[in-house]
Amino acid sequence: MTGSVVAQDTDGLRTLTFEAGDRNLLNPHLMTLLREALIAADADDDVTAILLTSSGPLFCGGLDIPAIRAGADPVVFAGDLVQLLHVFPRLTKPIAAAVHGDALAGGSALVAAMDYAVAVPTARIGSQEVSAGIWPMVAQVPLAHRIGVRAALENIGSGEPFTAERAREVGLVQAVVEPSELVPAVVDWLTRAQRGAPAYGLGRPSFYEFAAMDYDAALDAAFARFASMFKEDS
């Protein structure tokens, strides 16, 4: 199985560019490389923000279904996608995606897992498995958590990916810009986030942790976390 991830650093920003054929399909090898690259970027004290992008005409076409149809174990593929998606809410640094083309199925889950995402007008983002008689059991989770069940079902239940503009309307991406403006727009979001870099180490993981909790439980957990900050300083 093929795939590569190239890292480039510029003024504290680490850009991770992944590639696996024209459709950038996710296979266990590529997902392992992505997971390791994200963890390494998060652990690097010189990195204050992470930008995820890809090469080729598509941002990501999802799991490598042709490989699965050729005999690869679908449970292994899904398990590696789950392990990759587990990484995002635990990062201590802001992360954004530059969506230069379609982000489909598991690719849309990657977009949903980001803090920020910017897309070009022609990009389609979302699940399309239902149109083939398959329910997106794993990919649905980041989508539902990011945009809520009603908006997520608009895509998941129909198998029709969102247009870029509809993705912006439902909160899946922050902005839709022309291709020449894509990277500058993403970097602008990350530059703003970098101003809060000293607070991100504790703040970002707690944000995603509390967002997934019941309201009252989240408030109690937030208070306990707040109090522990002052106990550690004393």
Image: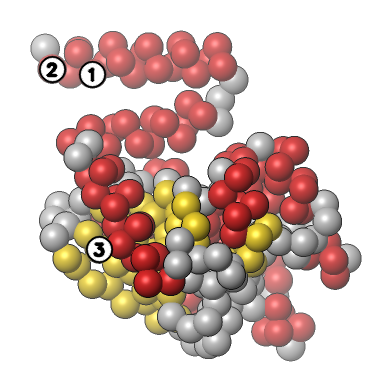
Viewed as shown, does residue 192 lie left or right of 221? left
Amino acid type assigned to the residue bearing label 1 in the image: Met
The answer to whether residue 114 is visible is: no
Mark 1: secondary structure: helix
Residue at mark 3: 14
- Between the C-alphas of marks 3 and 1, the distance is 29 Å
Residue occupying image coordinates x 16% and y 57%: 12
- Between the C-alphas of marks 2 and 3, the distance is 31 Å
| Tag count | 3
Viewed as shown, does residue 49 lie left or right of 26? left
Mark 2: secondary structure: helix
The 10 Å Cα crowd at callout 2, few under 14, some 14 to 19, many 20 or more, is few
Residue occupying image coordinates x 79% and y 61%: 159
Q: Which mark is residue 229?
A: 1
**Residue 166: x and y, percent?**
64, 52
Residue occupying image coordinates x 29% and y 57%: 187
The 10 Å Cα crowd at callout 1, few under 14, some 14 to 19, many 20 or more, is few
